[in-house]
Amino acid sequence: MEKIFLLLCLIIIITSNSINVDARHHISKKTKSKKVNNAPSPIEGSVNEPSPSPVSPPPLSPVSSPTSNVVPSDPSYGGGPALNPEEDCIFDVMEYGAVGDGSTDDTEAFVAAWKAACQVESAVLLAPADRIFMITSTIFYGPCKPGLEFRVNGVLMTPEGPDCWPKKDSKRQWIVFYKLDNMTFTGTGTIEGNGEKWWELPCKPHRGPNGSTLPGPCDSPSMIRFFMSSNLTVRGLRIQNSPMFHMKFDGCEGVLIDQLSISSPKLSPNTDGIHIEDTKSVGIYNSVIANGDDCISIGPGCSNVEIEAVTCGPSHGISIGSLGVHNSQACVSNITVRNTIIRDSDNGVRIKTWQGGSGSVTGLSFDTIQMENVRNCIIIDQYYCLSKGCRNETSAVSVGDISYRNIKGTYDVRSAPIHFACSDTVACTNITMSEVELLPHEGELMEDPFCWNAYGIQQTLTIPPIDCLQDGMPLAIGEAVDYSCSI
């Protein structure tokens, strides 16, 4: 009897296991079928259906794999084409209707591409290579998302001369970047100003009949202007033939300029290479500038400016000023110029102020500068005037704490190589001369260095000797004018 009972128990166990195996096989088939028919696609952006478990998992991201954390841009993922985030952030002006044939007005396409790129972080507005884009006077407004890049790989140019300039447009500026932060202007292309017809206007110096200068309005556009912007980078471009200033920064802070080529003819009037005013924390590096006016000009309200590895010439040299025009206050401080070359220029390093101004120029360092056939290699001119009608004034911008070190090369003998013409009532003070050696480029020295009311020291003998520089400090400093600045 006991044997019969054990046999019945064994039959029941075997039968139960067989039923469980069949059930698991059936459920497995249903589950696999459902997964195949409803698998999400990372390309189409499908999401998983809810799990039968009590808590449903969150839906999958459209770019996520349903089986791993690898995204399609990873080369190890084989679920679809890789995405390129950089290409997704490029706004090619050709896709916004630009023609790029050099004659069609492409302004609207650039504005449309700018508006789109402005809304995307780290976007690139692209003017592609092998195209010539003509646009009219335009303001590219901010604020924009950070990291915006305006990249010119082709040619971007102005209309050809004043007759082609739209009457509704300002004749004082061409491209303006306004209220931007963390923006880059770069590329391998050329910015062309078509300045020839502007330079020949009869109101320009000596362009009228018989070399005269006719009166009247004489507005001409500066090419590139950055206004009220910060953390800017300008790099790699060729900028040429501007009607007036090639590049201008005003009301800006945090500017890096690197590897630029700026050029216009030697006799092109008022074509300053880089002009800054009311701008702080500027670095200008590794650039070549040849033009018809100041290579670099630094106006009022500038501080903490460094210029290094720049080649100037032909030009009017590197200028601080002009400052104090119309009895205004001008403040400039902490300017360093080092490791530069100035050649075939009317001036070398110059400070120029109008009579009647106030404020100060202080903390300037000119270090390791090579002069090649330069007229007025080192000059302070506190009697700057554009006509013969400037009257004498008792007040002036104060000039002091100026260092000239390791300045060597050759000068044009038509002018004295060193010229310190300081105010009658406000002396130039704390001028330091060290290792200054300047020899005639051709011929012999015609004039000795000139000093007027200039005080300082010679740490080494100067060639030519500058015996006119007075030791110590003046006994009195002019009338009670506020020379203090806080910039």
Image (cartoon, rainbow, N blue to C red):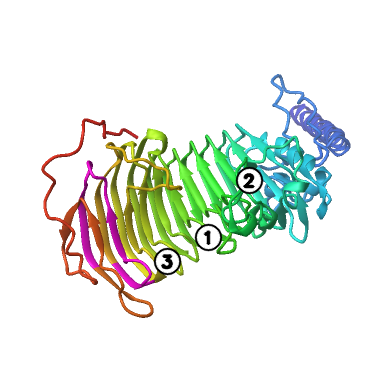
Q: Earlier in the sequence, mark 3 or mark 1?
A: 1
Report x, y in % for residue 308: 40, 59
Q: Which kind of residue does numbered mark 2 sit on?
A: Ser
Q: Quadrant of residue 96?
A: top right
Q: Which residue is mark 3?
A: 342
Report x, y in % for residue 218: 62, 44
**Residue 246 visible in this rendered orientation of the protein:** yes
Quadrant holding the C terminus: top left
**Residue 42 visible in this rendered orientation of the protein:** no
Q: Nearer the viewer, mark 3 or mark 1?
A: 3
Residue 412 belongs to the span the image colors magenta: yes
Q: Which residue is mark 1?
A: 259
Q: Residue at x 68, y 48 (%)?
A: 86
Disc 3 is placed on an element classified as: strand
Q: Which kind of residue does numbered mark 3 sit on?
A: Ile
Q: Image height check: is 422 above or below 35? A: below
Q: Crowding near pointer 1: few (<14 within 10 Å), some, many (20+)?
A: some
Disc 1 is placed on an element classified as: loop
Q: Is residue 397 left or right of residue 127?
A: left
Report x, y in % for residue 212: 59, 54
Give the extent of the magenta segment. Answer: 407-435
Q: Nearer the viewer, mark 2 or mark 1?
A: 2
Q: Which residue is mark 2?
A: 220
Q: Is residue 210 left or right of residue 32?
A: left
Q: Is residue 114 left or right of residue 40?
A: left
Q: Quadrant of residue 260?
A: bottom right
Q: Crowding near pointer 3: few (<14 within 10 Å), some, many (20+)?
A: many
Disc 3 versus disc 1: distance between alpha carbons?
A: 17 Å
Disc 2 versus disc 1: distance between alpha carbons?
A: 26 Å
